[in-house]
Image: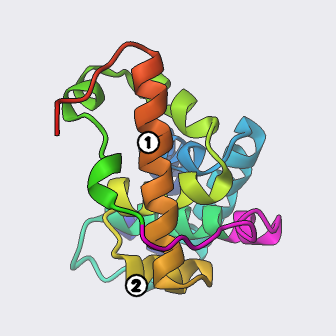
């Protein structure tokens, strides 16, 4: 499939799209509140992936390569909409007080998690996705979003606090500290 895409074979491109688009749409959806925005991100990402397919070195996973493009496209959309400007930096916050109960995350369906993420401000949701789901470090997040490392940390802490509160409202209880 990859070789076909590098040769600009439309059938190979269609196979790649059919295989990876459902997963990548879910990735895009975690960053956007509107399905239409997620679909725009997906289309832009696949266009860019097919256009830049020659830069894929096959040293890593193709899915990981596309995922990175999707995340970058989602972040570009959020920056374009100025959705990340409201991120604030907090001081003297103890992150240990705002962890998410592990048992709750195991029992929640993907749709439930999306619903919880959708109710968060854009900054919280974006940093949460990048740190918890994508595995970025705060330094990388700060660079990607044009914010300070402390702002990234604050947004994550506040996202976890919000998630914890929402989970408690749904009847999921956290273990005692």
Compared to residue 49, the image places residue 125 above or below, namely: above
- Density class for disc 1 (Cα within 10 Å; few <14, some 14-19, many ≥20) is few
Q: Are marks 1 and 2 in contact (CB under 8 Å)?
A: no
Cα distance, mark 1 to mark 2?
26 Å
Give the residue displayed 54% in from the left and 80% down from the top.
144
Residue 85 is labelled as none
In the rendered image, the residue lying farthest to the right is 81
Q: Tell which of 148 and 109 is nearer to you.
A: 148
Whether residue 51 is visible: yes
Give the residue displayed 75% in from the left and 71% down from the top.
85
Q: Position of residue 6 (x, y in %)?
A: 46, 74
Give the residue displayed 31% in from the left and 40% down from the top.
100
In magenta stretch: residue 89: yes
Which range is magenta? Answer: 76-92
Q: Tell which of 156 and 109 is nearer to you.
A: 156
**Quarter of the rendering containing residue 49:** bottom right
Q: What quarter of the picture does the N terminus occupy?
A: bottom left
Whether residue 52 is visible: no
Q: What quarter of the picture does the C terminus occupy?
A: top left
Between disc 1 and disc 2, the foreground one is 2
Give the residue displayed 45% in from the left and 51% down from the top.
16
Q: Position of residue 95 (x, y in %)?
A: 33, 59
Q: Position of residue 116 (x, y in %)?
A: 53, 31
Per the picture, the main secondary structure of the magenta-coloured stretch is loop
Residue 139 is labelled as 2
Count the labels in the image: 2
In magenta stretch: residue 124: no
SS assignment at label 1: helix
In the rendered image, the residue lying farthest to the top is 171
Q: Position of residue 33 (x, y in %)?
A: 69, 41
- Density class for disc 2 (Cα within 10 Å; few <14, some 14-19, many ≥20) is some
Q: Which residue is mark 1?
A: 23
């Amino acid at each position: 499939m990859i070789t076909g895409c590098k040769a600009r074979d439309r059938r190979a491109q269609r196979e790649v799209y059919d295989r990876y688009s459902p997963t990548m749409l879910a990735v895009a959806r975690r960053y956007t509140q509107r399905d239409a925005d997620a679909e725009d991100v997906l289309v832009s990402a696949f266009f860019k992936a097919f256009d830049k397919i020659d830069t894929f070195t096959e040293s890593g996973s193709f899915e990981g390569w596309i995922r990175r493009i999707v995340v970058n496209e989602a972040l570009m959309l959020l920056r374009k909409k100025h959705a990340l400007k409201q991120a604030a930096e907090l001081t003297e916050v103890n992150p240990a007080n705002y962890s998410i109960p592990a048992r709750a995350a195991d029992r929640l369906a993907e749709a439930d998690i999306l619903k919880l993420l959708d109710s968060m401000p854009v900054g919280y949701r974006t940093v949460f996705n990048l740190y918890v789901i994508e595995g970025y470090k705060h330094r990388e997040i700060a660079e990607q979003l044009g914010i300070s490392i402390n702002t990234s940390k604050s947004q994550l802490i506040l996202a976890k606090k919000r998630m914890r509160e929402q989970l408690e409202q749904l009847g999921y209880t956290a273990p005692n500290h």
